[in-house]
Amino acid sequence: MTQTSPATLVPPLAPHSETVRPEWVDYNGHMNVASYVLVFDHATDALLDAIGIGEAYRRAGGSFFIVEAHIAYRRELRAGDPVRIETQILGHDDKRLHAYLSMVHGESGELAATYEILGLHVDLKSRRAAPFPAPARERIQALAALHASRPRPADAGRGIGLGSRR
């Protein structure tokens, strides 16, 4: 019997794509803060589906909570602009997943925003952190192995502050 390597358990993640909706545009004429988070949340849902802890899993009593997030805005997006989001797993353990999502303009390829998250697998009955189920853990490990060859984003782990001006 042939043993399947972890990397064959899950295909690479396809980029998540959306188009900026007119109702997402604020009084400045560009996509508002909440809408960036909404689109990143849609891409995070696609990640959770890919690792097997999506909507059906939530109905069965397990979930994934974002416990920390950092968003950086780099370029304005306007109504009708296509966007594409790439997801990279930066780290994981039995209960946590650290991911970095990059939103680019779908035509120009310019970086529009980044979203770094730390999430926690949760048993919804106890409302406590719990280890990922084995199939999800194996898929996470397979994706992390695929992503290991990518360079770590330069601003991953960056804090917020004014810094020093010299």
Image (cartoon, rainbow, N blue to C red):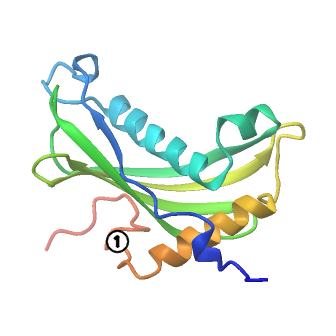
Could you tell whether 76 is left or right of 46 in the image?
A: left
Q: Secondary structure at mark 1?
A: loop
The C terminus sits in image quarter: bottom left
Count numbered badges in the picture. Answer: 1
Q: Quick one: 28 or 22, which is closer to the camera?
A: 22
The residue at 34%/50% (across/down) is: 85
- Farthest-out residue, left: 108
Residue 80 locus on image (x, y percent): 16, 27
Neighbor class of circle 1 (other Cα within 10 Å; few <14, some 14-19, many 20+) is few
Q: Is residue 40 visible?
A: yes
The residue at 71%/35% (across/down) is: 56
Residue 103 locus on image (x, y percent): 29, 50
Q: Is residue 67 visible?
A: no
Query: Which residue matches tag 1?
Result: 153
Q: Quick one: 128 or 123, which is closer to the camera?
A: 123
Could you tell whether 46 is left or right of 139 in the image?
A: left
- Which amino acid is tagged 1? Pro
**Vertical relation: 16 (above or below) 98:** above
- Farthest-out residue, front: 1
The N terminus sits in image quarter: bottom right
**Vertical relation: 104 (above or below) 94:** above
Residue 83 locus on image (x, y percent): 25, 42
Residue 159 locus on image (x, y percent): 40, 63
**Vertical relation: 49 (above or below) 95:** above
Could you tell whether 130 is left or right of 49 in the image?
A: right
